[in-house]
Amino acid sequence: MKKLSVILISGLLICSASCKKKESGVCYCTYLTGDSKDYNLSKLPGEQQQDSCNVLNRYASAFAGGCKLD
């Protein structure tokens, strides 16, 4: 039973260190070159977050990129 507990705790620690959770209200932009940029829009109301991310998406599309709000 102790071995199972140690294995479970080890797995949880490894996953928590390696799994990156995306934040809510952040506009994630990626580009064809592999570059990425995050814009924290969490202080804006929900509709403004989406509108702002859409504007960023239009800018990114000029550089073969795209943005998505999470």
Image: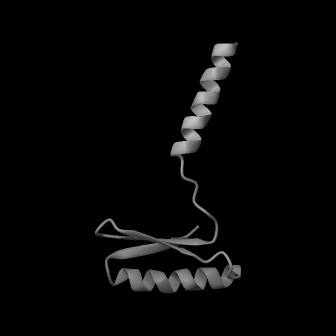
Q: How is the image coloured?
A: one colour
At 54% from the left and 52% from the top, the residue drawn is: 20
Of residues 18 and 24, the one nearer the viewer is 18
2 vs 51: above or below: above
- Residue 16, position as x, y percentages in the image: 59, 43
- Which residue corresponds to the image point at 56% horizontal and 85% vertical from the top-left? 52
Q: Nearer the viewer, residue 46 or 14?
A: 14
Tell me if residue 18 comes above or below residue 27 in the rendering: above
Residue that appears at 35% across and 68% down: 35
| Count of numbered tags | 0
Quadrant containing the C terminus is bottom right
Is 18 situated left or right of 41 in this image?
Answer: left
* Residue 17 placement: quadrant: top right
Judged from this view, the residue extending furthest toward the left is 33
Asked where in the image residue 22 lies, by quadrant, the reply is bottom right
Tell me if 1 is positioned left or right of 64 in this view.
Answer: right
Quadrant for the N terminus, please. top right
Q: Residue at x 40, y 68 (%)?
A: 36
Q: Position of residue 4 (x, y in %)?
A: 65, 18
Identify whether 30 is placed above or below 14. below
Where 13 sits versus 8, above or below? below
Question: Where residue 6 appears, x then y in whole percent?
Answer: 63, 21
